Every structure is written in structure tokens, then in C-alpha cells.
Amino acid sequence: MKTVEQMVTRWEDQRTIKNLMGKYVNCLLLNWEGEIFERFWSKKEDISLMFNNGAYVGQKSVDAYYKACHDRNALVGMLMQKRFPTLLGNKTEDEVYGVGPFKVKPLACPIIEVAYDRETAKGLWFCQGAYNDVEECGPVARWTWGYFAADFVLEDGQWKIWHLQYLNDVDCICGQSWADVQEPLPALPEFAELGTFSYPEYSVLQNFRELYSANRPATLTPEIPEPYENFASTFSYGVKKEA
């Protein structure tokens, strides 16, 4: 039987974790990826960030991904300034940083479980998102529907992300069918530099979740958190060793 104090602490932990992930997706919305690693991630060596087709594992790899996001935002801002000199020509580098991408990742249907030993926690959210980005074709809008799933660890009294999965079922150019192969839009010479930009290579190259299609087998949600005693007694949202 838990005491009232223990139950209140667990409720506060759940609220803190919910707010942590809210801050995380707001950093994406504001194109503040350059701040995410230091603000939200654990100092553990086995941290991991998983996407549909691969995962970054370890401090250096995850940090490099967010730095690449920052660099791409800066490049997009510069290209947008060149393309729209009347609107942006007199802006500084800092002022045009973040112009273009608009990444909306609303988190819904939260399921958050804090371990009874209060050393770790788990969370699962559905994300019916969308984003406007700038690609080699110029500005383009996409639907992105999927899941955020995470393990958290309590470090020095602060909850931090340990393992994070962002797995989409839908990643589709607006106006095209979710179930069909996406038809890329024609490239534009003024944005050609984006065609050569690349993110760091994944630490683990693996298809963790197939995008929705008419031929995709029935696919369950990521595993749903349930009450647990300690991390040894539950599953992990990290990359499996056999991967």
C-alpha cells in the first residue's frame, strides 16, 4: 500500500514527464533542436533515438543528430533569404534562422508509468502531426502521424530522456495518398543545396516500423507501458542488443 505522500510524488512525476515531452515538441515547433540534447537527454552512455528506418545510439551519435538539425535550419534560413530578398534580405543570420520549417507534433493519449522504485519511467503518446519544411523542391507540407515512446531516468532529481522512439505510420506529402508511394515534387535550382545535405549515419540501420500502405501487415502500437517495479522487470524502448 502506497502512502499519500508517495502517491502525490508519483502524480508530480507524471506531470513533470508530460511537461518534459511538451517542451520537447515545442522545441521542434520553434526549430530549437540545437537546445534539445543538453536540456532533455540523460547522461547515460546507452541513450538512443529511434526513427522508422534506423536509430542513433550513444551520446555522440544522438548529439550529432540534433547538431545536424540545427545546421540544416541555418542552411534553410540562408536559402530562404536568397529566394525572398525583399522580405528577408535585410535580416541577420540569427533573424533568418528557423525561417521555413514549421514542425507541429501534438502529443495525445498519454500513458505514463513511473516505476515503483522511482528510478525510471515510461511514456507513450500518439502524434497526429504535420510539418511544413523546405526541401530541394522548395516549401512542402507533409502529414506525419505516429507515436512517441520513451524511457525516462531520474538523474540528480531531474527526469531525463533515456530512450526515445519517434515512429510514424504516415509520412505523406499533403495532397498525395497515404497508402501509395510518394511522388517527389520537382527540384528547384535555388534549393539544390538541400539535395546534398545529409544527416549523420544511423548507428543501427534497421526498419523498425513500416509506413502505412495497402499491403502493410496489421501493425500494433509500440508496446504500451504498464505499472512496474523497476526497470529490470519491464521492457525497454531502447534498441535491442540483437539489432
Image (tube, rainbow, N blue to C red):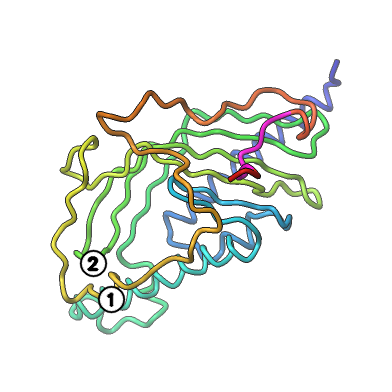
- Secondary structure at numbered mark 1: helix
Residue lying farthest to the top in this orientation? 1
Query: In the picture shown, does residue 71 fall above or below 243?
Result: below
- Apparent side of residue 62 relative to residue 27 in the rendered image (left or right): right
Residue 238 counted in the magenta span: yes
Residue 207 is drawn in which quadrant?
top left
- Apparent side of residue 95 relative to residue 7 in the rendered image (left or right): left
- Of labels 1 and 2, earlier in sequence is 2
Seen from the viewer's position, the closer of residues 196 and 161 is 196
From the top left corner, tell me how far across and down residue 165 is, in percent.
53, 43
Seen from the viewer's position, the closer of residues 19 and 205 is 205
Which residue appears at 38% of the width and 48% of the height? 104
Q: Amino acid at mark 1?
A: Glu
Marks 1 and 2, how far apart at CA:
7 Å
From the top left corner, tell me how far across and down residue 147 is, in percent.
46, 37
Residue 150 is drawn in which quadrant?
top right
Query: In the picture shown, does residue 164 fall above or below 225?
Result: below
Q: Amino acid at mark 2?
A: Glu
Which residue in the protein does label 2 denote?
136
- Secondary structure at numbered mark 2: loop
Residue 17 counted in the magenta span: no
Magenta part of the chain: 234-240
Q: Which mark is residue 94?
A: none
Which residue appears at 56% of the width and 59% of the height? 36
Which residue in the protein does label 1 denote?
193
